[in-house]
Amino acid sequence: MTTKNHDINGWEHYNSENEKKEMYALADKYLSFLTEAKTEKEVVTYIEKALKESGFSDNTAEGTLIRKLKGKTLLAARRGKRPLSEGFRMVGAHGDSPRIDFKQHPLYESCDLALAKTHYYGGIRKYQWLARPLAIHGTVVKMDGTEINIVIGEKDTDPVFTITDLLPHLAQKEIEKKVKDAFDAEKLNLVLGSIPDKSEKKSPLKNTILNILKQKYAMEEEDFYSAEIQIVPADKPRYVGLDSSLIGSYGHDDRVCVFAALEAFLNSPQPEYTQIFIVWDKEEIGSEGSTGAQSHFFDYCIEDMKEAWDKDAKLSQIYLQGKMISADVNAGLDPDYQDAFEKMNSAKVGYGPCFNKFTGSRGKVGANDAHPEYIAFLRNILKKANIPWQMAELGKVDLGGGGTVAKFLASYGIDVIDMGPAVLSMHSPFEIVSVVDLYATAKALSTFYKS
Ligand code: MN
Ligand code: MN
């Protein structure tokens, strides 16, 4: 028996039948969440439903609060025994994932196919999205304000969509190109159909699509101006490996943290400190926009909490004593790309949630750098709860890097650090996380909420 609770394999740490049962019950629930929530809006809808089903309501008199913005970002809070002026425990994650969006003038036809022009969202490796089944999820708002929700490609009886790729027989020129030049964003066009509308001379193929849209959704071509249509993988999440120890799915980044944080939040009632659970949008494109972490949404929610629970508190008191975990995924050490990592400081799949003291790139530029006092506090609570965890950074120093929402919250004076499970094939249509990491992350976040 080891007494160490960091840098240990989670499967060796949690080895009782009971723990395994709990682990897979949580994982099954996570799989159905992933199936249901493939866009930021669907993530927020799921959370709202889960909160309501567990009896959590927007009632500040009872010590609970829910705030939403545009259906894309959500904050839930639970009043603590201590006044808000003594700070809070907050977990923040992001509900958006890399994907491909329709352009606002999407429809056209070419070579007897009807197609849609697209613009990708977030960091994708374009070739991973070619020649595979894709679904569309979105919202169309008509001029009178009517909202039409579209989901096609998820039911077994639905058709799916695809972006074509060049056959190897004719790819001699392509394979000589650098990857960055070989895949052109303007060639990420979605196949929508191939039957011409005989009554229409000018654009017979496009017209067939327009007729279907009109019939099914009462929408006109110009309604695409006020629409957000997202293209996502049509596949369902699956267990991976002979031992079913891993989960493969689109959107683990960052829905694995959204889900773990929601579970932790729901399972940690009657807190010492006020608890906050927040899900932001737009993280994958820099956290800007009114629903991103750089917006004032969080300030407005704190204002409401202060008004309801601790009128005389100073905002600076609340923020400066606030503690937060920026729950976001880490890059797992990939056996095929070990040379991109510095192994002593890399996150391992199956080793529990991973802390990143800092993110940023090329010399910590753009990083929140968590303070050692705060990390010591977190080490201590995880030690007491005997939860496995690890500490890492994102790949080799000069290879690249990345950012999260942490630095935007750090600007308030809140103590904040990044933490989340290691992911393989991050930002791909089929990302991998470990069942044991999901379990340990939910436990770690729950421990943090109760601290
Ligand atoms: Mn992320
Ligand atoms: Mn990401």
Image (cartoon, rainbow, N blue to C red):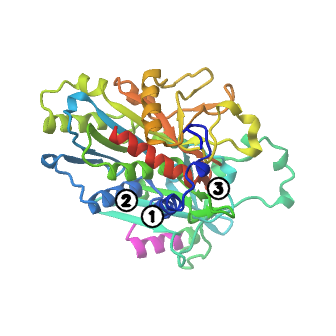
Residue at 47%, 32% (x, y): give it.
Answer: 379
Q: Earlier in the sequence, mark 2 or mark 3?
A: 2
In front of the other: 247 or 203: 247
Residue at 22%, 40% (x, y): give it.
Answer: 80
The kind of residue on which mark 1 rests is Glu
Q: Is residue 272 left or right of residue 191?
A: left
SS label for mark 1: helix
Q: Is residue 345 above or below residue 327?
A: above
In front of the other: 70 or 187: 70
* Quarter of the image that includes the N terminus: top right
Rounded to the nearest angstrom, the CA distance separating label 1 from label 2 is: 8 Å
SS label for mark 2: helix
The residue labelled by disc 1 is 36
| Residues tagged 1 and 2 counted as in contact (Cβ below 8 A) | yes
Residue at 43%, 37% (x, y): give it.
Answer: 384
The residue labelled by disc 2 is 46
**What are the residue bounds of the magenta stretch?**
207-222
Q: Is residue 23 left or right of residue 161?
A: left
The kind of residue on which mark 3 rests is Trp
361 magenta-colored: no
Tell me the tag on residue 261: none
| Residues tagged 2 and 3 counted as in contact (Cβ below 8 A) | no
Q: Earlier in the sequence, mark 1 or mark 2?
A: 1
Tell me the tag on residue 129: 3
